[in-house]
Amino acid sequence: MSYKSFVGAELKVLVDMDGVIADFDKEVELRLKNRYPEIQITETRKNFYISDDYPEHSLLIRSISDEQGFFETLPLVDNALEGWQRIIDLGYHPVICSSPLGTNPYSKAEKLNWLRQHFSPIFGQWVVNQAIITPDKHLFGGIALIDDRPVLKNSDIATWKHILFDQEYNKDVTNKARLYGWLDDALPELLEVASISNSNPK
Ligand SMILES: [Mg+2]
């Protein structure tokens, strides 16, 4: 597909990074496989935190995602660039909204570098300039937040509606709007519903 640059739209759609556009788990599994081939990679991810899926190796796995260079090397989630373009084409303004990993002092800077590497060449520098890296996503405005985390802190007082980005480890959540990957045909309707509920404040 060809990508068009952002032309400006009023309604913001916030987009998480890890597990939504940046494949955190894949990089952990790759490093595990290369360094510790004796550790069996789990077939089905069950817990939000990958370290919880490896109870015997949880400290090791946490040390992997705390390494310098970890966040910069995450592979793209399938079709993430197409998804970003779809949001723009539907007339919305996508904005990155991602939490730093508290135990990794490089995560914030590396997340921005990752966007520079993957998103800026295609969409422009505005993606990085407008990116919000915060532990308090509820403080930032938007009609929707596309995020893979099952429960978001203070979502009840946020302006956005949580659209859950489908992952194996969030299958149990049944009370949220769900996006089944970036090519999901339901994206226009999910954003439309979010924009309507946003114009009718709670
Ligand atoms: Mg996430």
Image (spheres, rainbow, N blue to C red):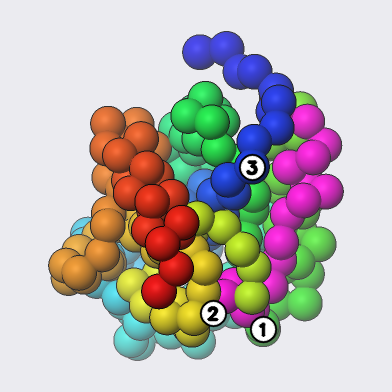
Residue receiving disc 1: 103
In this orientation, does residue 51 appear?
A: no
**Amino acid found under the numbered disc labelled 1:** Thr
Name which of mark 3 and mark 1 comes first in the sequence.
Answer: 3
Give coordinates of residue 159: x percent, y percent: 52, 68
**Amino acid found under the numbered disc labelled 3:** Glu
Within the image, what quadrant is residue 173 found in?
A: bottom left
Give coordinates of residue 189: x percent, y percent: 30, 39
Query: Is the CB atom of the residue marked by disc 3 within 8 angstroms of ligand 1's nearest atom?
Result: no
Q: Dot 2 lies on which element?
A: helix
Classed neighbour count for the residue bearing mark 1: other residues with Cα under 10 Å, few (<14), some (14–19), many (≥20): few
Residue receiving disc 3: 10
Is disc 3 in contact with disc 1, using a CB cutoff of under 8 Å?
Answer: no
18 relative to 9 in the view: left or right: left
Q: Nearer the viewer, mark 3 or mark 1?
A: 3
Give coordinates of residue 1: x percent, y percent: 51, 13
Q: Is residue 73 above or below residue 136?
A: above
Is disc 2 in contact with disc 1, using a CB cutoff of under 8 Å?
Answer: yes
Within the image, what quadrant is residue 126 found in?
A: top right
Q: Is residue 193 above or below residue 157?
A: above
Residue 94 part of the magenta-drawn span:
no
The answer to which of 48 and 84 lies nearer the viewer is 84
Residue receiving disc 2: 62
Query: Which residues are drawn in magenta?
Result: 122-138
Residue at 37%, 77% in the rendered image: 151
Q: Dot 3 lies on which element?
A: loop
